[in-house]
Amino acid sequence: MYYFFRRILFLFDPEIVHYFVFGILKLLNFIGLLNLFKNPKKDIKHVFGLNFKNSIGVAAGLDKNGEYIEILDKFGFGFIEIGTVTPRPQKGNSKPRLFRVEEQDALINRFGFNNQGIDKVLENVKESNYSAILGINIGKNFDTEINHAVDDYLICFRKAYKIADYISVNISSPNTKNLRDLQSEDHLNILIKHLKAEQSKLKKLHQKYTPFLVKISPDLEPINLDVICKTLIENHVDGIIATNTTIDRQDILSSKYFQEPGGLSGRPLKNKSTSVLKYISKRLQGKVRIIGVGGISSYEDAKEKFDSGADLIQIYTGLIYKGPGLIDEIHRGIQQEK
Ligand SMILES: Cc1cc2nc3c(=O)[nH]c(=O)nc-3n(C[C@H](O)[C@H](O)[C@H](O)COP(=O)(O)O)c2cc1C
């Protein structure tokens, strides 16, 4: 059924289709129809001190503003990561900024953190009813100098702390100038130290510990990964998300979108992302827990991530190409494996 709708939807601009589909789903949710498809998938996992009802999550970027939490919850995700959210609202890059590389089950996006700003996004969350774990992914505004980036992360961190189950710190989007420089040793150390200090202050204030995770790029060299792993272990950071999209185009050389700037996700990203996952997993030795994301479009792909060291997994592009049935497929596979 999904493939039938997909054939029609794929005739239109991908960004317009995104808002159209979620607009319809919101309507169906409002009139109670989504409850008919509600599909709780139980396979409890305890990670970062949190109880996940299952290990399949939706990756950041699908619901940038926390407007579709109830829908994604009803799809059966164990956790939902919203954002990336910045301190102030911003429009993002000019359109078109999302492209389908259909022959490869991939997407290229250069959204540039279009979002309603942390205050509005938190209002959206408060109005939502959900049972999944909620992650809030935070970033910096495009016009904040990289040397002041810490201030932006701190603003979002303080505001999101109480309401989020976990916070993920996005320093790996290729669509915000210089953002990925924050993965370098000096920048990362400063950022992590500030966030850790803030986390312990907020823990006392709210009597609640909110874990935070760092989301990394698949385009890092082993030497950079070593530095990141060392910094996260030394500072007792709760988790790492591997990975964001890639700027590498080697696997889509033949596509007409080859030259479109932005982050590539989906099938061509899988191996690159999994190599990073394997590499960091060996170095982290379970001291920092891992969410594996990048190119998952089947149970076999998900299993490969778990076998490579992931505690939990996230999907985005696979969901666009295969529909919500992908969550069932992965969940069934996990259950059968037990
Ligand atoms: C259209 C689009 C928008 C995205 N926006 C964000 C974002 O705002 N923040 C972020 O951390 N990751 C973002 N991502 C990256 C995804 O969260 C994920 O890390 C990446 O797409 C790899 O997973 P996938 O191959 O399953 O899509 C975005 C991905 C896509 C396709």
Image (tube, rainbow, N blue to C red):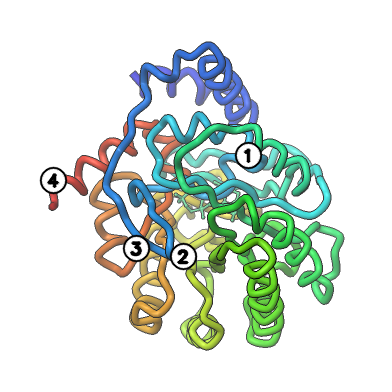
Q: At 47% from the left edge and 61% from the top edge, which residue is drawn?
A: 250
- Secondary structure under tag 4 reads helix
| Percent of width and height locating residue 69 | 55, 36
One can see residue 215 in this view: no
Q: Residues within 10 Å of mark 2 (few under 14, many from 20)?
A: many
Amino acid at dot 3? Asp
Which residue carries the number 3 mark?
Answer: 311
- Identify the residue at horizontal 65%, vertical 61% (top origin): 206
Question: Which of the two labelled residues, at mark 2 and mark 1, occupies the earlier sequence position?
Answer: 1
Q: Amino acid at mark 1?
A: Gly
Left or right of residue 53: residue 91 = right
Q: Is 139 located above or below residue 289 in the figure?
A: above
Query: Where does residue 242 sit, x and y in percent of width and height?
Result: 46, 65
* Three-letter residue code for mark 4: Gln
Which mark, residue 201? none
What's the distance in space between the residues labelled 2 and 4, CA to CA?
26 Å
Which residue is under mark 2?
242
Secondary structure, mark 2, is strand
Query: Which mark is first along the chain, 4 or 1?
Result: 1
* Residue with the mark numbered 4: 336
Of 162 and 338, the residue lying toward us: 162
Q: Earlier in the sequence, mark 3 or mark 4?
A: 3
